[in-house]
Amino acid sequence: QPVNANGVLSVPVSGASDTARRAAIAGAMGQLIVRLTGLPMLPQSPIGQRLRADAEQFVLGYSYREAPVELAADSPLGSPLTETRLEVRFAVQDVQRALVRAGVEIWPASPPPVLIWLAVETAGERRVADAVADAEWQQRLQSKASALGIRVIFPLMDLEDLSAVSYTDIAAGFADPVREASMRYGLDDVLAGRIQVLADGQGGVVHLGDRD
């Protein structure tokens, strides 16, 4: 989940001991600094390690709660249905100042959203992704982007979009049609990519192309 307006993150915690709480808070700090900067390796850097070690100094409050676990289809019988999570409220501005003092660039208060066009190939069908047929891929991308502090938006795929952009435009990397179709959304950052779904139902981004 993204950091909410109060600077609260929710992370799993192994128990109620001081050791478990400190480990969870350090993990939450790692997530926070990635979302503030978009730098996934930052927690392993010297400044990231220092902030994680001193994470409790930036904590304004915390609480424990039980939360449902999202089980995969192949999860064994008897898998836990809930898990204990620690909700940590950080002094986000103090963390931001610490990063800036260390020379780390941070996102602006409201990072500009990124418009994403996806070309999807599955079972011999080729299409431009839409919110109905490809909700799973869109949700996965939103989750990955959120962890980096990035907000993504997908095109409406109404008649105007369908007449302006085709699967081939995106898959072959033809930037001009995508760029022109994106103008109606008024966003500066546009990303086009292609996903191929394999026979076993798995898939991956095999081309992540032009970004304006």
Image (cartoon, rainbow, N blue to C red):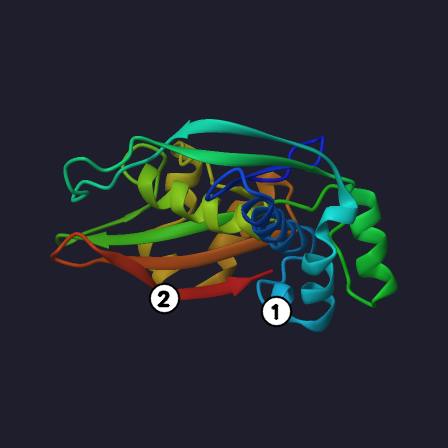
Say few, some or many: other residues with alpha carbon within 10 Å of mark 1 (under 14 / 14 to 19 / 20 or more): few
- Place of residue 24 in the rendered image (x, y in percent of width and height, measured from the top left): 56, 47
Q: Nearer the viewer, mark 1 or mark 2?
A: 1
Task: Decide if residue 173 is in sight here.
Answer: no
Quadrant in which the C terminus is drawn: bottom right
* Image-based side of 14 in relation to 47, left or right: left
**Which disc is residue 102 wearing?**
none
* Image-based side of 91 in relation to 204, left or right: right
Residue at image coords 54%, 47%: 20
Viewer-closest of 47 and 100: 47
Residue at image coords 53%, 39%: 1
- Place of residue 49 in the rendered image (x, y in percent of width and height, measured from the top left): 67, 66
Viewer-closest of 127 and 97: 97
Residue at image coords 73%, 64%: 50
Viewer-closest of 118 and 176: 118
Q: Is residue 164 above or below residue 102?
A: above
Q: Amino acid at mark 1?
A: Gln
Q: Earlier in the sequence, mark 1 or mark 2?
A: 1
Residues under numbered marks 1 and 2 in contact, where contact means CB atoms less than 8 Å apart: no
Q: Is residue 102 above or below residue 108?
A: below
Q: Is residue 84 above or below residue 105?
A: above
Residue at image coords 31%, 32%: 132
Viewer-closest of 208 and 136: 136
Q: Amino acid at mark 2?
A: Ala
Task: Decide if residue 80 is in sight here.
Answer: yes
* Image-based side of 169 in relation to 186, left or right: left
Q: In whole angstroms, how far apart are the C-alphas of marks 1 and 2?
A: 37 Å
Q: Which residue is mark 1?
A: 44
Say few, some or many: other residues with alpha carbon within 10 Å of mark 2 (under 14 / 14 to 19 / 20 or more): few
Q: Which residue is mark 2?
A: 172
Classify mark 2: helix, strand or loop.
loop
- Place of residue 142 in the rendered image (x, y in percent of width and height, measured from the top left): 47, 44
